[in-house]
Image: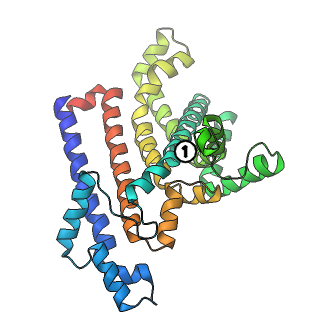
Amino acid sequence: MGPFLLRRCLSFLATLAVASVVVFAVLELLPGNAAEVILGETATPESVAALQARLGLDRPPLMRYLDWVGGLLQGRSAHSVSYDTPTAELIAERLHVTLPLAAMAMVLTVVLALALGLYAASRHNRIGDVGVMAASQLGIAIPNFWFAILLILLFAVKLQWVNAGGFPGWTEDDGGGLREGFVALLLPALALALVQAAILTRVTRSAVLEVLREDFVRTARAKGLSRRQALWRHVLRNALIPVLTVAGLQFANLITGTIVVENVFVLPGIGRLVFQAIANRDLVLVRDVVMLLAAVVVVVNLVVDLLYAVVDPRLRHG
């Protein structure tokens, strides 16, 4: 287990280092003057020069990169140009919405996908299987922002069970509470989960059908296990490797792909923050948000690799 963990951790660090170089290069070393992009075409040369000095753009690129990475490693962050606030504070404030939203969407995705995937596989080529596959194909074809609009029209406008958007906060001091915050994120999480669950359902069904054809499943049935017992005790665990792979990528996508849904529901999350940063030409804030999202993807992939070893011990010695 030790060498397995060491290899994965070294790969994690190397990927994170490469990601930082790519993010810095894209936003800092592209042709053009970043200060002019931020201030716009009507900016005076004096204001451009002042912003260049403030952002450190008058220093060599290597020095700027080392200063940025060193600041991140020490817990320091640059100041946002448009908000005049450390980017770490802005990001931490928005993560209080995005992380619970992504977690709720992931739970809904896994529950729906496992239930529907096992149901379809256990009724292969029957009406239940055909119905689940048709519904999943529809879920893949329709984008999540369209689901979001439909959910608002049904539950907020017609039934008036919830508000159409906004977030009251997690505490009473913010005007909300745990229950109010959970209710406010329920529809956005469902809108995100429906598309991802449709994809994961098809993966789960295919993986379960493949394992069902293995000899050890027939042996388990011959020993007297029912089809349901064989599915839950033997088939599901052996089918989890491809399911975990897709689920890990989906969780990263749920965090990095909330921009549209958070804007539909007017949620103050990371997605809305990066959208506003791009609109305000705040390249400093965009750089740090993109680096955070890249780090999230890398961390999720590391966690998925470790889960592989838990599900299938053979991979620890592979």
Front position in the image: 208 or 169: 169
Q: Is residue 42 visible?
A: yes
In the picture provided, is 8 more to the left or to the right than 174? left
The residue located at (59%, 54%) in the rendering is 267
Type of the residue with mark 1:
Leu
What x and y, as percent, mark residue 88? 38, 55
- Answer few, some or many: residues within 10 Å of disc 1's Cα (few below 14, many 20 plus, some between 14 and 19): many
Viewer-nearest residue: 49 or 69: 49
Rendered position, 157 above or below 8: below
Q: Examine the rendering and report whether any part of residue 32 can be seen.
A: no
Q: Residue at x 50, y 37 (%)?
A: 204
Q: Position of residue 93 (x, y in %)?
A: 47, 50
Above or below: residue 237 compared with residue 289: above
Q: Position of residue 160 (x, y in %)?
A: 80, 46
Q: How many discs mark residues in the rendered view?
A: 1
Residue marked by disc 1: 101
* Residue 225: x %, y % from top left: 51, 11
Whether 3 is drawn above or below 134: the answer is above
171 sits left or right of 234 in the view: right
Q: Residue furthest front?
A: 173
Q: Relative to residue 217, is residue 229 drawn left or right?
A: right
Q: Who is closer to the viewer here, 15 or 38?
A: 38
| Colouring used for the render | rainbow
Q: Which quadrant of the figure has residue 135?
A: top right
The quarter of the picture where the N terminus appears is: top left
